[in-house]
Amino acid sequence: MHLPICTFDAKSGILCPKCESKIKSGYLTQTDVKISNKLSTLGDKIPELDKATLVHVLDVKGDIVLVVGNGNHDLLRKNQLVFRLLENELKSKIWIVEDNSSSRKILEELFFPIKILMVNVVWLPDGSKLTKVIVPGRQTKRFPLDINQVKNVIKEINKMEVIVEFELK
């Protein structure tokens, strides 16, 4: 896996001066380093990781958000075996989004496996905006996502305020 820190640093746990300067400048965080260390050891268990690129890692209220390179979302998220192995090894709920994606694509990636029916932007009188996401069905205890955590992740990644509505067919 291509990591935000050097492969040697990820495997050894000791940062070179170049990677250390990335942390001091704020380009990388300690979470990036910690998750890079864990992912570097998972390459033997999960061969699909060798094809992926990790750009950045965020910690959102205990959940891990992996920002991956373009085209890597499907490789890691839609393969349930790979995704479950990642969650078990990292011991956390994992969210995967692609770097430099549109707002709509980020929403679709975070709501996966739920299909989004519609996304509307609502402009408020004070000049701020809300994004309204409409999904099919209704929210029950069996709904596969925690809507509040999805909102927190979206706010952290894209600085977007989101309202989720359910539409019955």
Image (cartoon, rainbow, N blue to C red):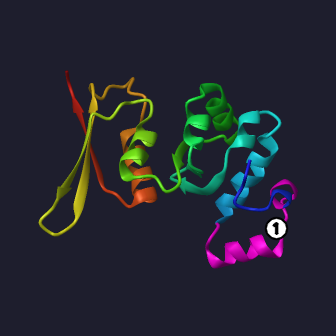
Q: Is residue 46 visible in this depiction of the protein?
A: no
Image side of residue 87 versus residue 117, left or right: right
Q: Residue at x 86, y 59 (%)?
A: 8
Determine which quarter of the picture holds residue 138: top left
Residue 20 placement (x, y as % from top left) = 76, 73
- Seen in the picture, residue 68 relative to 126 is either above or below; the reply is above
- Residue 23, compared with residue 53, is above or below; it is below
| Image side of residue 166 versus residue 125, left or right | right
State yes or no: residue 145 in magenta: no
Q: Residue 73: x and y, percent?
A: 55, 41
Give how far across and how far down residue 53 sits, in percent. 66, 50
Amino acid type, mark 1: Leu
Residue at image point 68% right, 77% down: 24
- The secondary structure that most of the magenta stretch takes on is helix
At x 39% / y 23%, what residue is drawn?
Answer: 142
**In this rendering, is residue 129 above or below 62?**
below
Q: Quadrant of the C terminus?
A: top left
SS class, disc 1: loop
Residue at the spot x=65%, y=52% of the render?
A: 54
Mark 1 lies on residue: 15
Vertical arrangement, residue 60 with respect to residue 22, above or below: above
For the question of whether residue 5 can be seen, the reply is yes
Residue furthest to the left in view is 125
Q: Which residues are magenta?
A: 9-28
Task: Say which of 123 and 152 sits in front.
Answer: 123
Residue 43 sits in quarter: top right
99 or 128: nearer the viewer: 99
Residue 136 lies, in percent from the top left, at: 27, 28
Q: Is residue 21 magenta?
A: yes
Badge 1 local density, few (<14 within 10 Å), some, or many (20+)? some
